[in-house]
Amino acid sequence: MDDLPDGHFKALILPHTGNVTHVQIPARGFSSDFAAVIDSEKGRFFVKAMFNNPGGRKDSILRERAINPYVQPLSPPLLWSIDGDEHGWIILGFEAINGSPSHFEPGSPDFSIVVDALNRIADIPLPQVARDWTETRWNDFAADSNEAKMFQGDALLHTDINPSNIVIGGGASWVVDWSWPTRGAAFIDPAILVVQLIAAGHSPASAESWAAECTAWVSADPKAIDAFAGAELRMHRQLAKRNPDASWLMAMAEAAQAWAAHRGVPESGQ
């Protein structure tokens, strides 16, 4: 199939798929070098792959493989995987699911399902494999080290809550794309949801009302949420500044700013 990356890739997946009959590339890009739903002699699979190069992108696909046994049935099971040689591919073959991305816009009927998905994440015990995956990405954007400590914890986090990663269909729902699971404060995933909801058109108060349905949010220290709101704003501002052509990053920065203002959090880091 011409939609597969190269001949080496085809040869690697052949024992798991047999002849490939159709390749469907998702409309929304994934943070990987290749992602597609593949129909084949041996079934239908969602296939995700990275070049076997050192660095964060390679680490993310290895984390996704390692965490999969612990996040089922919330996430589709990994059916097979391939480690390429030093210059080859790392390929994951998941069970393909029939569903569509959730909707975060005001009036969407999906909110109760989204909240349930976050509560199901919160119910997953932290597996041993994730104990060293300490969440640190917001630390540099905290006002000080005391605020950064508020982001620590022993909860398993998804950290990329967005409409495309909560899939709904046939009376079921899944949380997909576990590319960067970490160990941290349990309220972080609901806090990420808040910014996503604001970016989708909600007021900060409305967004927080849905987060308040999440068990991890209810038990959180409001000061920790304030600290995270400030760090989230500073992070998104920096990302938007570094990527001025990415309009979605500017939208996220504006949503984070609206949330921080709602909570009375100063924009400065100090």
Image (spheres, rainbow, N blue to C red):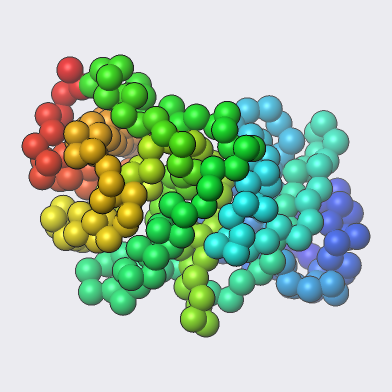
Residue 223 as seen in the image, left or right of residue 101: left
Query: Which residue occupies the foreground of this view, 108 or 114?
Result: 114
Residue 21 position (above or below residue 254): below
Residue 240 as seen in the image, left or right of residue 76: left
Return the x and y of residue 13 as percentages of the image width and height: 84, 57
Residue appearing at x 31%, y 77% in the figure = 109
Q: Please state the total of marks drawn on the protein image.
A: 0
Return the x and y of residue 226 as percentages of the image width and height: 19, 36
Residue 169 position (above or below residue 191): below
Residue 46 as seen in the image, left or right of residue 20: left
Query: Which residue occupies the foreground of this view, 242 or 58?
Result: 58
Farthest residue, direction bottom: 170
Quarter-wise, where is residue 111 in the image?
A: bottom left
Query: Which residue occupies the foreground of this view, 196 or 264?
Result: 264
Return the x and y of residue 56 as percentages of the image width and height: 59, 31
Question: Does the image show residue 6?
Answer: no
Residue appearing at x 43%, y 27% in the figure = 136
Question: Does the image show residue 48?
Answer: yes
Residue appearing at x 43%, y 62% in the figure = 117
Residue appearing at x 27%, y 31% in the figure = 231
